[in-house]
Amino acid sequence: MHYYLCKKIRSMTTEKDKSTEEKIKEAARIVFMKKGYSATRTRDIAEEAGLNLALLNYYFRSKEKLFQQIMMEKVQMMFSVLFPIANNPETSLEEKITLLVENYITLLTKNPDLPLFVLSEIRNNPDHFQSKLGINLLKDSSLIKQLLEKRPDINPIQFLISLLGMTIFPFVASPLLQAANLVTENDFGDMMEQRRKLIPMWINSILDCR
Amino acid sequence: MHYYLCKKIRSMTTEKDKSTEEKIKEAARIVFMKKGYSATRTRDIAEEAGLNLALLNYYFRSKEKLFQQIMMEKVQMMFSVLFPIANNPETSLEEKITLLVENYITLLTKNPDLPLFVLSEIRNNPDHFQSKLGINLLKDSSLIKQLLEKRPDINPIQFLISLLGMTIFPFVASPLLQAANLVTENDFGDMMEQRRKLIPMWINSILDCR
DNA sequence: GTCTATACAAAGATAGAC
DNA sequence: GTCTATCTTTGTATAGAC
């Protein structure tokens, strides 16, 4: 009988079966992230997991379903930085900016492929991603309010996009930057470390200077 | 006999055969850009071109070869804005900045999928892209010199990445920005029009304000 | 040069033994 | 739960008629 029909019962009785299911997910993360959905073969995932191909279907029913789970994880990773910081009413605007930059650089240094993966998979196949990430979880945020308070003349969305662009874009563009001989692979890490200070400094120039 | 063996002769004799070959390329641009290399089927391209599948192989030998031609075109489009502007010694730094922003926004408004396509295909399959975009065509550019002259304390590469991030990132991220309810599809065009003024203004804040 | 038909390989999914 | 073997679909490439 197929796994997905008895998942509930299993998870109530034994808590020890992380192993195989999690192994497959682990492998799927690696292969999907590296090659994208279409270029990934289920056989690659099975091999990466050191397991048999049939297990994929046993646990996840199809390539598509497995992918959707991984995809959701990754989208959430991307927003798990932005949403909590933007919505914390305890921190100042300056603190929020610093935190956003720091946390994104930390996250993306560990997962450099994350943004390009998420962005390109959404564009290539929008059906994979019909989710609706909490409506207005950002538009009503403390961050937006503080921005409007400080600079009512600036569109906060435009501002936020610039901040995210300065922070996230380098990771998205790094292969091309290297092709254009702007950066070597070695430099890149150092540069991003410097940007932890640089971006907040420049952002403050924009906000304070008039 | 196969086309690629007699291409030279043909192109010397008749100049009228744009039609079929160009139709295939046209279709390939559309389909590859929309779905990426792996998700594209040669049948899709043939259908999009209103032609038979066999013609693809007759004219381009393989899917791979056809793709490489399209890919090179697209990479060149991306750099055809940056390189000439950066290397023009006649314009001032401020003019260069304005031109870069204007020209990229114009280009990408017409081709919104361009950057994500180029970036993700390079990352997914680096073999497709072993090209060597003129070494140091940027490092020795007039743009870099002018930046160093004005602000010797700023790393010009870091600066350039910020400028490109503010300009190009919105196009890369627009599906996600829409998912996060930051922008609607309608707003997006207007926002990018506003950014033509906004980005140079902000960039000048960074350069002038100390 | 263009088409139809088809060969051939790759990849997703499943059946059934253990 | 896990494996081997196999079915089926899909996709690239080619042969050969016109």
Image: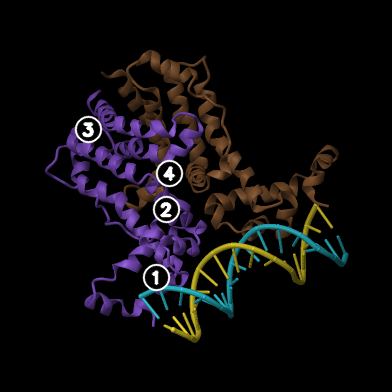
Chain colours: A purple, B brown, C yellow, D cyan
Q: Judge if badges 3 and 2 mark residues of a common chain.
A: yes
In which image quadrant can residue B15 be found? top right
Mark 1 or 3, closer to the camera: 1
Q: Amino acid at mark 2?
A: Met
Q: CA distance from mark 4 to mark 2?
A: 18 Å
- Left or right: residue B82 compared with residue A79: right
Which residue in the protein does label 3 denote? A151
- Is residue B195 visible in the rendered image? The answer is no
x, y percentage for residue B23? 69, 50
In which image quadrant can residue B146 be found? top left
Q: Earlier in the sequence, mark 1 or mark 3?
A: 1
Mark 4 or 2, closer to the camera: 2
Which residue does the image show at 83% across and 42% down from the upper left?
A: B10
Q: CA distance from mark 1 to mark 2?
A: 18 Å
| Subunit ID for the residue under disc 2 | A
Q: Residue furthest left?
A: A90
